[in-house]
Image: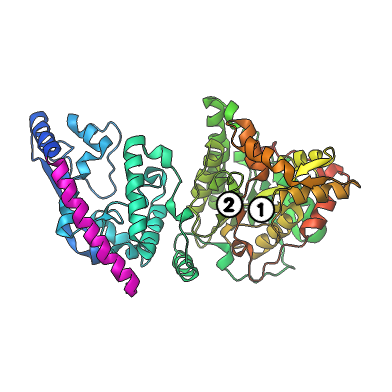
Amino acid sequence: MGYSRKKQRELRLKREFDIIVSITGIVFLLPIWLLIALLIKMTSLGPIFFLQDRPGYKKRIFKIYKFRTMHQGSEKMEKGVEVLKNDGRITKIGGFLRRTKLDETPQLLNVLKGEMSLVGPRPERVASLEDYTPFIAKRLDMKPGMTGLAQVSGNIYLELQDRYRLDVYYVEHFSLLLDIRILIRTIGVVLLGEERYKGRNLIKTMPIKRKHKRSLKDSDAGFEDYGYKKRFSIDKTSHKNVLITGANSYIGESFKSYANVHYPKLKIDTIDMMKHSWRAFDFSSYDVVFHVAGIAHADIGAVGNEEKARYYAVNTELAIETAKIAKESGVKQFILMSSIIVYGDSAPYGKKKVIDETTIPSPANFYGDSKWKADQGVRKLGDDRFHVAVLRPPMIYGRGSKGNYPALSKLAKKLPFFPDVNNQRSMLYIDNLCEFLCLLVLSGEGGVYFPQNAQYSDTSELVRIIASAGGRKVHTTKMLNGVVAFASHIPGKIGDLADKAFGNLLYDQRLSQHHGLHYQVVDLNESIVLSEGKITSADGADSRSDLG
């Protein structure tokens, strides 16, 4: 990789910084190293250090230094074998060394020799090079590090592909300032544990130049089959047999009603997933399975372990099992309703959260995690003959919907005054979703999709529109914004509600635009007017009863 003069200066500063810190660290740690060496020799047979070949800059092989933490001979693991918690191969002192990361500190010698840097992509085993794509190989364009961006972003909770993505991001955007921020956070990870930093990666707070962002996005295609990169050619006259798995869901029933009117050549059936007999159902006559079965709208703070297990059983295991049966039955397309919840909570009041192609899913609770695991699980089943499409929509609303929108609607119809907060949120009107689904079914494509309205919503503006649709007026005033700011800092439900109502959470609109797939048929104002109309019997299904 060729660097600009500015980046070359940064590399020189980086090397000088490495030398100064490594020498200082070695001098400071030398007495501790002598004590560790003594304890290793006293508690197990074998050498003090564990040396292993690792690929460095431009695949140059070097020997990485570590204190030995496993019994002699057990370190020689085959490719893909992990060292587990409470692993019997770990020595008595080895467990302590691993928890405190002291076993890694001899790598300061690698840093001083110029084989490694303090910060960079962590060096992997030589055998892993066989699986490198051109994109992943970019992580070798810089010296490996003792710590890295992935290690301070909840490393053990990240998928391998996400760790690679963070490594490549670092290589393309490294700076001495970023190195210092990573080193400071590394101290926090060592002292407080990785759980505290789960999903909190530094790239969300680092400015990205447009040309770099474009480079990362284009080279990331091997990890996510993003729908916005496709060109669709849709035959609206074709026939498709569609099976909705999950009866009486708001989305499923709305999709079926919408398709019956606008796309009558789509033959749609629904199966109840509450009964075990669904497993004996013949899927082979269907072209598409649309999976909506799941549990939603959890009160996260009031759920026990047994109920959490039920969320994983339904939202994760049932989704993957259904996809496997569909694939074995010769179904050509499987569509899963995931959610924006896989990216965690919205940004708190006064802060912004924009999800783009570089954003890594980081669920904030078990509900989001159950959705994320299903999202990953069904996509692994996709191939050339079984196209898997995953939808991660934002809040869905419309006549008869459940959740946050009806609560906001009630407030708009009762309150004379409301805070005037300029926030932004992605939302998706039910008819826009149904149009998207019909076109996606006709296309037969797989991929990851982020459907949303063409316009972002503003909570205060929503309240004004809802009130106007009901023939009344709500006065919005910034004088109440202080109350919102205060409420957002109150721990518990009050703060959560303030952030949920007035926080920011949006998709980059580029993720939601598709060549040849035009689904945003209703604009924001019209959708609110339609949502506030009378509810018909076909619109009243409860989105919380998604199994059947």
Q: Is residue 267 above or below residue 44?
A: below
User: Magenta segment range?
Assistant: 1-30
* Numbered circle sitting on residue 424: 1
Q: Quadrant of residue 489?
A: top right
* Numbered circle sitting on residue 172: none
Q: Is residue 2 within the magenta segment?
A: yes
Image coordinates for residue 531, horizontal then vertical, percent: 82, 49
Residue ID at (26%, 57%): 144
Rendered-image quadrant of the C terminus: top right
Question: Dot 1 surroundings within 10 Å: few (below 14), some, or many (20 or more)?
Answer: many
Relative depth, front residue between 347 and 71: 347
Q: Amino acid at mark 1?
A: Gln
Q: Quadrant of residue 292?
A: top right
Name of the residue lying farthest toward the right:
471
Provide the major secondary structure of the magenta segment.
helix
Relative depth, front residue between 56 and 498: 498
Question: Dot 2 surroundings within 10 Å: few (below 14), some, or many (20 or more)?
Answer: some
Image coordinates for residue 485, horizontal then vertical, percent: 64, 40
Q: Which residue is mark 2?
A: 352
Residue ID at (47%, 54%): 205
Residue ID at (54%, 35%): 313
Relative depth, front residue between 132 and 66: 66
Q: Is residue 158 visible?
A: yes
Image coordinates for residue 190, horizontal then vertical, percent: 31, 39
